[in-house]
Image (cartoon, coloured by chain):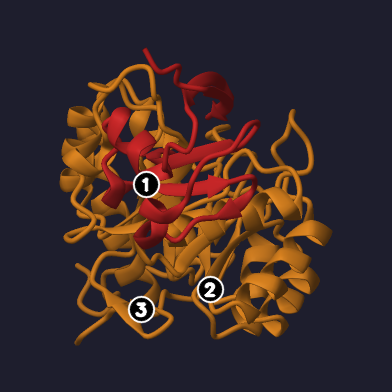
Amino acid sequence: MSDYLKISNKKFKSRLIVGTGKYRNFIECAKAIKLSGAEIVTVAVRRVNISDKKKPLLMDYVDPKKITYLPNTAGCFSSSEALRTLRLAREIGGWKLVKLEVLGDKKTLYPDMIETLNSTEVLSREGFKVMVYCSDDPLMAKRLENVGAVAIMPLAAPIGSGLGIQNKINVQIIRSQTKLPLIIDAGLGQASDATTAMELGCDGVLINTAIAKAKYPFKMAEAMKHAVIAGRSSYLSGRIEKTTFAKASSPSKGII
Amino acid sequence: MKKINKVKIKINGKKCLINQKMTLKKVITKFKIPLDKVAIELNENIVDKRKIAKINLRENDKIEIVHFIGGG
């Protein structure tokens, strides 16, 4: 059975998207990406260091012809900053598939959903394919869909917190109301969190800190790869119903 | 000796003195910027990278050159 993650008519075998931040260096980052099996990686847009011409470039270590770059707007606290950033990202080399995040609070890094909604609408009209980092509010998720988002990306918990999914019910409600790719973005801490997300019916997960800041990032990259595959298979398998009392696994007939 | 007039510009927030009528392309070349891996803004307007040889820089111009770095 072919099972792909389809985002805006593009198919991906892996349902794990990984971030490229917080690694000690680009060599470590590239190896972790490879071990994770991810085909999409998020990248940030920042000023070139003009005084250090020998500074290594991400593109020299992670080939954008082989791995899909997903430019993000990390660090943007207003719609105008986010739009400026993604228009520049598109200019670097034609990137139209982007991850929008407009933050509203420095302590929680929660998304400002009003600015996020407005930005999604503008970007979609400009031809961008916008994957949107958002709160886990089903009503806002629906509104994002209505203004042209190509993927809904609710947070599991605050970015980098490693707390895992805090509101499974909301994730399930969002799942039930949308056919768009639903990707958990932010807040996962360990492999079982990724499995849980997939078992809730999510189409994928986006992980950065949980891999990059693990004691052994390469081992965690592999763990996340397997966790996502396991969670997806479990979801597709149709789990048993939960019951209060036991049901014996061995037949009672023929007991001596 | 003929005096070359200089103009003040800002590149990525840093003040620079460049020769008058220097083109954007010459500045990019001077700083060894890999053009295929960056995007450029001049005074907050995105620049078409194919046209940078025709853009003469003026006093107080602000250039932003960005690229992709690691991020989540």
Q: Write down the chain letter for disc 1.
A: B
Q: Nearer the viewer, residue A61 or A50?
A: A50
**Residue drawn 45% across and 21% down?**
B4
**How many numbered tags mark residues here?**
3
The answer to whether one can see residue A6 in this image is: yes
Mark 3 Cα-neighbour bin, 10 Å: few <14, some 14–19, many ≥20: few
Q: Quadrant of the C terminus of chain A?
A: bottom left
Residues under numbered marks 2 and 1 in contact, where contact means CB atoms less than 8 Å apart: no
- Quadrant in which the N terminus of chain A is drawn: bottom left
Q: Say which of marks 1 and 3 sits in front.
A: 1
Determine the residue positioned at 19% across, 61% down. A65
Chain label for disc 3: A
Q: Which mark is residue B38?
A: 1
Q: Position of residue A117 (x, y in %)?
A: 76, 67
Classify residue A177 by image quadrant.
bottom right
Q: Callout 2: residue from which chain?
A: A
Chain that is orange in the image: A
Name the residue that disc number 2 marks.
Answer: A128
Tell me where residue A2 appears, x and y as whole percent. Answer: 21, 85
The kind of secondary structure element at disc 1 is: loop
Q: Amino acid at mark 1?
A: Val
The foreground one among A64 and A248 is: A64
Residue shown at 27%/29% (left/top)? Answer: A217
Near mark 1 (Cα within 10 A), the count class, few <14, some 14-19 or many ≥20, is many
Q: Please say if the residues under marks 1 and 3 sit with CB atoms less than 8 Å apart.
A: no
Rendered position, A49 above or below A20 = above
